[in-house]
Image (cartoon, grey):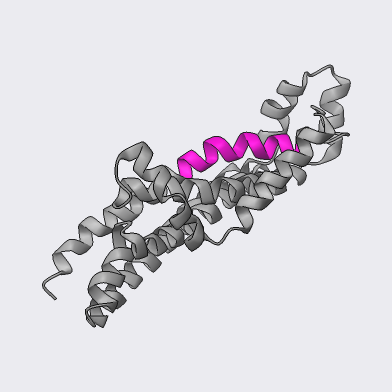
Amino acid sequence: MDNLPNLPFATWESFYATAISTLLAMVVGLPLGVLLVAGEKDGVLPLPGWLMTLLNAVINLLRSVPFLILMIAVLPLSMFVLGTSIGTPASIIPLFIASFPFVSRLVETSLREVDGGVIEAAQSMGATPMQIITKVMIPESLPSLIANATIAMTTILGYSAMAGIIGGGGLGQIAINYGYYRYKYLIMVVATVLLVVMVQIFQSIGTWLAVRCDKRLRK
């Protein structure tokens, strides 16, 4: 039990890696998700067919790579960018690369839930494609976007725990190095419980925000 004092810091590392990775994934995944919907042939901002095909292919390719393999594959990139391939900062790079395609698909799903009549009404009033995207599509899908961002955040938290296998820091490393490898199963259980608690907190906050932003529930 002499390693228990490390758990608060490991919890912070897991939260830090998850929050930064989710933020970066949203910064890249949100515009990509918008393009996947708006850039279609009948979308508000049609893009060349070859570009849409390439975009979908890249996203599907990155989503299909198992996270454990992806972590190992991008170790040289982490070393090049940060000068190290271990630790919490280094784990953010594979977490980001693994999560932004996932986020883009979640954003795409949310935007497809927007009523087409609302978009057509905005077009009939002369709104530009950018106005339709920023003032109609995103606001109308905001509750779903928040709910899906919560799903992404909890998924990334699970990925961050897996990053402990390659020295990614956080609760995952505590559970594996100090719990599993050293047969201190109580530490492993405590680390797992802390991860579960973090998931519950993220989910509760995300659900609350999604409900607060849902105009249908405020009527």
Tell me if residue 196 comes above or below residue 89 in the rendering. Answer: below
Instruction: Assess whether residue 33 is covered by the magenta stretch.
Output: yes
Residue under the image location 67 percent in, 35 percent down? 138
Of 144 and 162, the residue lying toward us? 162
- Which quadrant does the C terminus fall into? top right
Frontmost residue, 109 versus 120: 109
Q: How many marks?
A: 0
Residue at image point 73% right, 44% down:
56
Which is nearer the eye, 164 or 27?
Answer: 164
Question: In screen coordinates, is 51 left or right of 5?
Answer: right
Q: Residue 143 at what x, y percent from top left?
A: 62, 45
Residue occupying image coordinates x 18% and y 62%: 6
Is residue 100 magenta-colored? no
Describe residue 83's horizontal placement relative to residue 131 as left or right. Answer: left
Q: Residue at x 39, y 60 (%)?
A: 163
User: In the rendered image of this protein, does residue 168 appear above or below residue 57?
Assistant: below
Quarter-of-image position of residue 83 = top left
Which residue of the protein is positioned furthest toward the left in this rendering?
2
Task: Decide: is 41 above or below 124.
Answer: below
Most common SS among magenta residues: helix
Above or below 94: residue 118:
above
Residue interval drawn in magenta: 22-37
Residue 58, percent across and down? Answer: 67, 45
What is the x, y in percent for residue 202? Answer: 44, 55
Comparing 11 with 197, the one in front is 11
- Taking the image as shown, residue 178 lies to the left or right of residue 119, namely left
Spot occupied by residue 156 in the image (x, y as percentages of width and height): 47, 55
Can see residue 211? no
The quadrant of the rendering that contains the N terminus is bottom left
